[in-house]
Image: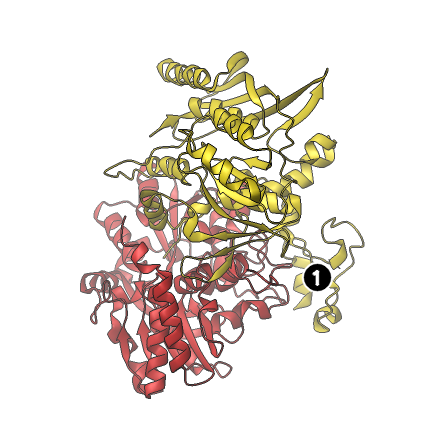
Chain colours: A red, B yellow
Amino acid sequence: MRYIDEFRRDKVARAIAAEMAEVIPGPTQVMEVCGGHTHAIFKYGLNDLFPPQLTALHGPGCPVCVTPMGKIDQAIALARRPEVTLASYGDMLRVPGSQSSLLVEKARGADVRIVYSPLDALRLARERPDREVVFFAIGFETTAPANAMALLRAHRQQIPNFTLVSNHVLVAPAMKAVLEAPDVNIDGFVGPGHVSTIIGTGAYEFIVRDYGLPVVVSGFEPLDLLQSFLMVLRQLSDGRAEIENQYTRAVRQDGNRHALDVLGEVFQPCDLEWRGLGWIPRSGLQIREKYANYDAERRFADVTALPAVDHPACICGDVLRGARQPHDCKVFGTACTPETPLGACMVSSEGACAAEYRYGTGRVPNPI
Amino acid sequence: MFEWLVSTTWQDALFIPAAALPAGKAAILPPSKDRLAQNDPTWVLAPPAMRSKEIQLGHGSGGRLTAELMQRVFLPAYSNPLLAILNDQAVFSLDGGRLAFTTDTFVVKPLFFPGGDIGKLAVNGTVNDLAMGGARPRYLSASFVLEEGLPIDELKRVVASMAEAAGQAEVEIVTGDTKVVERGHGDGIYINTAGVGVVEHACCLSANQAQAGDTIIVSGPLGDHGMAVMARREGLEFDAPIESDTQPLHDLVATMLAAVDGLRCLRDPTRGGLATTLNEIAESSGVGMVLDERAIPVRPAVAGLCELLGLDPFYVPCEGRLVAIVRASDTDAVLEAMRAHPRGEQAIAIGQVVADHPSTVVMKTCVGGTRIVDVLSGEQLPRIC
């Protein structure tokens, strides 16, 4: 693969950093919504290149993190059923439920499988007709189309022992919820890249229209992100509020029509509970009546998601809303580490706490 | 709310004094609402997984969980000074001679991959663990756990490959064992090799010898082995396939030892990769490290595949590379000697040992930021969105 080095040049980075320092109008808080962006900011140490008045707030764009604990408990309850093979992505397995995690259940003998794609789960179902294969599906609009395709394929190939738990979440309602939160002040957004390839940049118009804030959709390489933050700062400095697209090599205004059609065929919007943001109207996707046979929550209707309270010392909810930073948490890096996570944000490779713990130099005196 | 914490508990979570954390046994007291409310820093919540009761895959990753298992299970039981150093081999004197002794087990899947197979790996892995102690490897053992139904032709291929690798590494396989388990109870072939070597040099290579000012060197590009196996396992084909770097390093080490006397520590960055290896050395020596990301060699194909799978090449295992910690004044001489050797042609300095931030490895990133390079935690898991 090529085209990596072009986006990682330190000379260009320094030039962008210098311009940022020049145009920043004053203390500014810019939220990067996507967990992939949060991760890249820490991995490349971009904070060191930001002007001191710029604070990057980490947003709710990590699907593992925003899945509430009750849902994890539900997955665990499903995995404990003797006839069920539960498949999900690796990160999901380590998220603590109220008493256990899927990984612990796996070590105790539950049939829990790590898959890299929903099609792997579908293959499991085909190969083991005697098992009920449940795919615990999470993700924003980026991953939802692939999961919808898997469901459609199961339908076409008449695979009766494949079902899905749909925990799909939508990014725009979450951004709106963050803007409405009383304890968060945001001057602009660095918008998600991969999600925007599906939904297009048009989806953020309400932010400009109703809130008068700039949005810059960004790529994931360090220079992409630096440039996107700079573009937000330039808008603020000019007194503009527009949607700009930094990630033109992947994102179009209208998004991906085909993917959106597949989503619409399989799913319909539903109200959903988010960790840290609570219930948000029409912020999730549920399986349409037409495909009810593939809905694990209908097939195993007795296994429901009960409300569960996050660990009292954990501030994941505040972190996901951008109200607090990971290092503000008193168990950050002590009781809560990637090996012994108390909250979901320390688990996922896209979680803000995991990113700051793994890469952040904040706890190191004189790093270099 | 607190009742929930006490009774249904997040896996036995309890409040214990901060000072008692590592032992986890001293003065375990019942949690109290007041302590949390008062934000009393002397009381912290004990990490629940410290008491995780089952083995997880991550315990075999070579990262933090493996280290925890060593501390909790093996070291207390086998307690002795040689083991306590936690090098990849034990070096000791026996009847006047200095010997190095090591063992390693191989469970790679698939058995055959571009650039090697489980047999070649089993020989080179043990040869390299001996070499990293400054030893000339001499004799190996080979023990096989075979699964019922394994084609004998496959076993023959693996054994032939081991014989060839042993020839290259100038060792002899002088003893061994064979066991067979029922179908479904193994993955074809597991191999254990143990090895002894002779330490002829007066050197004292150990992870606890690094000193502030020393140079950190790697012998070649990182991550080839891990990504060669991953690519084969995931069925990812490339124009030019990534080949495993598995190779014996004993003669490269001999060349380095002959060139300079300022070698402090040698390690082959296998499980857990470069990042975990450097963290182990930093912790063992009580020093910090500063790396320059732009200097760290990673082949474009490996970097690309890592990007695709959401992996970090600094955590991907190598099976034919070494990391050397060298006295600063010997840097040029040792690099020159390594580059003159076919297995060290691409040797390069990637950073310095420092007195600041002991036990922490920091990196200057490619765009000029800074970040921590931490120990591998759990298994490397691909991104999900």
Classify residue B115 by image quadrant.
top left
Q: Position of residue A43 (x, y in %)?
A: 45, 59
Classify residue B39 by image quadrant.
bottom right
Q: Residue furthest top?
A: B174
Query: Pointer 1: residues within 10 angstroms few (<14), some, or many (20+)?
Result: many
Q: Position of residue A53 (x, y in %)?
A: 48, 79
Callout 1 amino acid = Val
Residue A279 in sight from this viewpoint: yes
Above or below for A269 versus B68: below
Q: Residue at x 64, y 58 (%)?
A: A335
Q: Residue at x 60, y 43 (%)?
A: B281
Residue B269 in sight from this viewpoint: no
Q: Residue at x 27, y 76 (%)?
A: A244
Which residue, given by chain and number where applicable, does mark 1 sit on?
B44
Which part of the image, by quadrant, shows the C terminus of chain B? bottom left
Above or below for B11 versus A222: above
Which part of the image, by quadrant, shows the N terminus of chain B? bottom right
Q: Position of residue B165 (x, y in %)?
A: 43, 19
Give B8 or B385, whichever is nearer the viewer: B385
Classify residue B19 by image quadrant.
bottom right
Give A358 or A297, whichever is nearer the viewer: A358
Give A297 or B102, whichever is nearer the viewer: B102
Q: Residue at x 36, y 85 (%)?
A: A237
Q: Is residue A192 left or right of residue A311?
A: left
Q: Position of residue A345 (x, y in %)?
A: 51, 62
Q: Is residue A22 left or right of residue A345?
A: left
Q: Identify the chain of the residue marked 1, using the numbered disc in the image.
A: B
Q: Residue furthest right?
A: B27
